[in-house]
Amino acid sequence: MKIEFWSIGKAHEKSIKDAIEEYTSRIQKYCPIHWEIIPVPKNAAMMSELDLKRMEGKIILEWLDKDTILVALDEYGKEMSSIQLSAFITKKGNMGTKKLVFLIGGAFGLDEAVLKRANHTWSLSKLTFPHQLVRLLLSEQIYRAYTIIKNEKYHHR
């Protein structure tokens, strides 16, 4: 199974880029992994929140293959423990999932059409985090999930 992290916004900020790349490279030993940074539309500052979300949503939906399992990170999604996340990834792999995409929305979240298309919605926390920090948290949690799956020492129960 291939995992992709999609995020709307700018490239990884210099202050956390190394940490994101470190966890991403650690995941590589378990499965193919790829980051896709989806640029904000050029005239975003001139758009309403609703129009911006719709435009971002249109781009996302055009990029998705019909067989891709989409996990939308959303504040109203289901929270999972690290152990539950590892079970989720295991289940998707056992079901023959070819590609699993974890999607981080733009500044105003995800368009309703994207949330309807999502196979799962996941909330990292009830707290609100900067999008750049969410990238780091996501990569670390997926790495942690794989160490749980492989029964490695990184995660202490």
Image: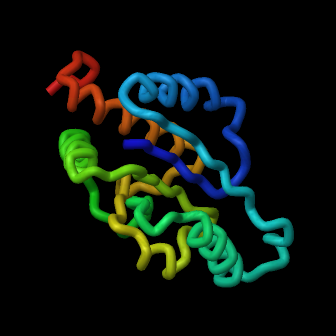
Q: Quadrant of residue 58?
A: bottom right
Q: Is residue 70 visible?
A: no
Q: Relative to residue 24, is residue 46 drawn left or right? A: right
Q: What's the residue at 71%, 31% (across, down)? A: 14
Q: Relative to residue 152, is residue 36 drawn left or right? A: right
Position of 126 relative to 66 (above/below): above
Q: What's the residue at 78%, 67% (across, down)? A: 41
Give the image location of residue 76, x and y in percent: 36, 69
- Toward the left, the furthest residue is 157
Q: What's the residue at 21%, 46% (across, down)? A: 94
The residue closer to the viewer here, 1 or 133, is 1
**Quarter containing the C terminus:** top left
Q: Relative to residue 69, is residue 59 drawn left or right? A: right
Q: What's the residue at 84%, 77% (across, down)? A: 46
Give the image location of residue 28, x and y in percent: 45, 27
Position of 24 relative to 89 (above/below): above
Q: Relative to residue 142, is residue 107 drawn left or right? A: right
Q: Is residue 138 visible?
A: yes
Report the number of numbered marks: 0
Q: Quadrant of residue 66?
A: bottom left
**Quarter containing the N terminus:** top left
Position of 152 relative to 114 (above/below): above
Give the image location of residue 97, x and y in percent: 32, 52
Colouring convention used in this rendered image of the protein: rainbow
Give the image location of residue 12, x and y in percent: 67, 39
